Amino acid sequence: MKTVILNVKRLDHNRDLPLPSYHSEGSSGLDLQAAVDKAVTLQPGEIRLIPTGLSISIPKGYEAQIRPRSGLALRHGLGLVNSPGTIDADYRGEIGVIAINWGKEPLTIKRGDRIAQIVVSKVYRAKVEEVDELDPTKRGKGGFGHSGV
């Protein structure tokens, strides 16, 4: 397994929170914590930007993906609107988690709650070439459930 250095800068409103970390030996994502000043309650269907108090520097050729945490999604309906969210290698601003409460009950996020995870992934740049025809496949233009349930 290749290791990539992820430089992390704490912002003033994150000084008392732990840095992102893996919570098991096989974890793919580093947990991100909420750096909210006071508890935030999301009503069902409500979308809020939750600060993390962190900025990162990702090596060129990589991205960071912000993903939901499965336990919060299952138990409380907490999701991310733009899942996965992408942090490009040249972005240096604060990581914000665009959270939505898909659940039926209000959900309160407190300071230090692990609200999302960050996965560092290799990026491949595409060279766009215009063509008149695409190579044929058995599937062809079939999509949006064409293969059944």
Image (cartoon, rainbow, N blue to C red):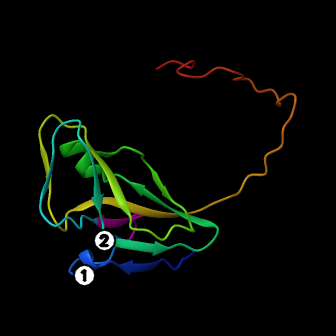
In which quadrant of the rendered view does residue 59 lie?
bottom right
Q: Amino acid at mark 2?
A: Gly
- Residue at image mark 1: 15
Mark 2 residue element = loop
Reply above or below: 44 against 62: above
Count the marks: how many?
2
Q: Residue at x 59, y 66 (%)?
A: 62
Q: Quadrant of the N terminus?
A: bottom right
Bounds of the magenta span?
Answer: 25-32
Q: In this rendering, is residue 26 above or below 102?
A: below
In the image, 7: left or right of 126?
Answer: left
Q: Which residue is mark 2?
A: 53
| Front one among 23 and 84 | 84
Query: Does the segment drawn in magenta span residue 26?
Result: yes
Kindly report the secondary structure that dominates the magenta region of the rendered protein.
loop
Task: Point out residue 50 in the picture as x, y percentages from the top left corner.
Answer: 27, 57
23 vs 43, nearest the viewer: 43
Which secondary structure lies at badge 1?
loop
The Cα atoms of the two marked residues, 2 and 1, are separated by 8 Å
Residue 85 lies in the magenta stretch: no
Earlier along the polypeptide chain: callout 2 or callout 1?
1
Q: Are marks 2 and 1 in contact (CB under 8 Å)?
A: yes
The residue furthest right is 132
Q: Residue 87 vs residue 38: left or right?
A: right
Q: Kindly identify the amino acid type of the residue bearing the numbered disc 1.
A: Arg
Residue 126: horizontal and vertical position, in percent? 74, 52
Estimate the x, y position of residue 51 in percent, counting from the top left. 29, 63
Q: Quadrant of residue 74?
A: top left
Give x and y (percent) for residue 4: 54, 76
Number of residues whose C-alpha sits closer than 10 Å to that of mark 2, classed few (under 14), some (14–19) or many (20 or more): many
Front-most of residues 91 and 137: 91
